Amino acid sequence: MSLKGVITMAVTLLGVLALAAAASLVTLTTYLHRTTESMGEAVEGVRLAEALQVDLLSLARLPVSTSPQLPATNGHSLASTQAAVQLHLSEARSNARMEQELAMIDEVERSISAFFLAREGLQNQPAEEVSRVMGPRMEAALSALDRLVEFNVQEARVARAQADRWDGIANIIGIGVAAFLVLGGAGLLLWIRRFVFRPLLDISQAMRRFGSGRKRTRAPEEGPTELREMAHTFNEMANSLSRQQEQQLTFLAGVAHDLRNPLSALKMSAALVTSGRPVPEERLRKTMGLVRRQVARLDRMVGDLLDATRIEAGRFELSLEERDARELATEVVELYQSGGSSHDLRLLLPEEPVMLSCDATRIEQVLHNLVSNALKYSPGGSVVEVRVERVGEEALLSVVDRGIGISAEEMRNLFAPFKRMGRARETAPGIGLGLSVARRIVEAHGGRIEVDSRPGMGSTFRVRLPQSHAAAHPPEARPGESVPGPADSVH
Ligand code: ADP
């Protein structure tokens, strides 16, 4: 699982929870508000019913013969009591919400009206008659009001029970949300500690150990995707550094090995010359030839090493001059021929000059590398050809051998530095820098280097370089016409 996914999920969950809590709070407060309202209405209903009862009882105490406007001993007049009854009745009606309550108020109104009517018909009647007629009417009105009171009390109880229920639900929701937040938060913290901080610490520890020299240290690839990727990248970097270190050690071993061979040849030659014994001239000539070859080989190795470091550091410069490619090839081949090579080394040159604007030392270095490889990787006595040709506007320098050849698989990394192929490693010493340096030199001249090879049959290395502008269109050649130079001279 990815860190981004977990954080998105946690934030979404928190948002949904907050929304749900807010929605339930709004619903609960609305219901609670309604419940308090209906409880208030019920209490008001009880108050009004009791006020009506008080009105009726005060009316019962007024003498029947009293004038409507005259106040009785308790300060109430018939008219003011009737007005109070009407007011309380209309208030009770507007306070009532339910059909059942309205019907009860209608009944109360009817019984009070019956009470008033009976009272009017009893003017100047004896007191016994008044109490006989009014008694049951009063009882009927008071019990209608009692029922109204009872109804409202019942309503208030229902509202209270409802309020208790909503209160319970609100408590459950509150405790649930709090518990979820605490448990969810603790769970998230534990997850982050176990799956984020621990792998992160492991990676930083692995980096510190690696930095302090323990090169075998690798970071465990666990935890969320991002950290696994980070550990994987670190491990790949550590592997690549280890590989580079191994390559450097192999390279150093190769250099030491390659230096030892020419050095021991030089040591033996020096011992022969300085032994004090007379050395036959022929032997001396051969020994000096050997010395010359070994010194040239050492020179080339050191040159390749220096060039490789210059190329890596981006400090590779050319000092260009106009030179005939035939001269350069001749100088290189003559050096090898004079060195007493056991190969049949041939040079094929055109009659016309093949002019190059080039760094002559560098181009000679390329040819040296190719010729020395051709000699190294082909059996003694076999033919090695060096050809110079003009193909269109290009100068073509080829080195052909009939040696061990290069397989298709080996061909892929042929020009990579420090790469030495299986059979070549067994055949001859080398450090695997010559071809990579040669390619960089040729490319720096705006040219390219190509190989054709068949394992066991031999190899052809071709260097194509642009001819210098002056020589690209010799006076006798028409522009655009390619003039392939005949490979006609054999040395
Ligand atoms: P080195 O010769 O010092 O190993 P190079 O860079 O000159 O380094 O060559 C790299 C590799 O290419 C050689 O090790 C060898 O495997 C292969 N190679 C180069 N030239 C030839 C050749 N003419 N024939 C066969 N293999 C060759």
Image (cartoon, grey):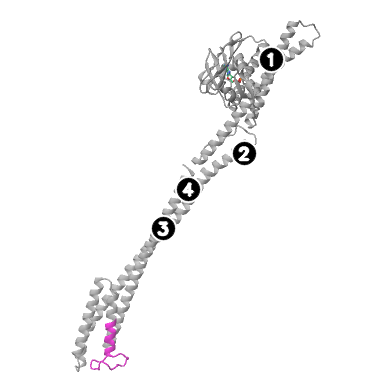
SS of the residue under disc 1: helix
Image coords of residue 155 (percent x, y): 30, 70
In the rendering, which numbered label is found on residue 208? 2
Q: Earlier in the sequence, mark 2 or mark 1?
A: 2
Q: Earlier in the sequence, mark 4 or mark 3?
A: 4
Mark 2 Cβ and ligand 1 under 8 Å apart? no
Q: Is residue 465 left or right of residue 293?
A: left
Disc 2 crowd rating (10 Å Cα; few below 14, some 14-19, many 20+) is few
Q: Nearer the viewer, mark 4 or mark 3?
A: 4
Image coords of residue 202 (percent x, y): 57, 40
SS of the residue under disc 4: helix
Q: Judge whether residue 75 is colored magenta.
A: yes
The residue at which mark 4 appears reads as 7
- What's the distance in space between the residues labelled 4 and 3, CA to CA? 21 Å
Q: Are marks 3 and 2 in contact (CB under 8 Å)?
A: no
Mark 3 Cβ and ligand 1 under 8 Å apart? no
Q: Which residues are magenta?
A: 61-87
The residue at which mark 1 appears reads as 293
Q: Judge whether residue 89 is colored magenta.
A: no
Q: Earlier in the sequence, mark 3 or mark 2?
A: 3
The residue at which mark 3 appears reads as 21
Mark 1 Cβ and ligand 1 under 8 Å apart? no
Disc 1 residue type (three-letter): Arg
The answer, for residue 230, to whether it is visible in the render is: yes
Q: Earlier in the sequence, mark 4 or mark 2?
A: 4
Is 71 above or below relative to 250? below
Question: Magenta stretch mostly in which secondary structure?
Answer: loop
Q: Quadrant of residue 324?
A: top right
The residue at 60%/39% (across/down) is 205
In the rendering, which numbered label is found on residue 143? none
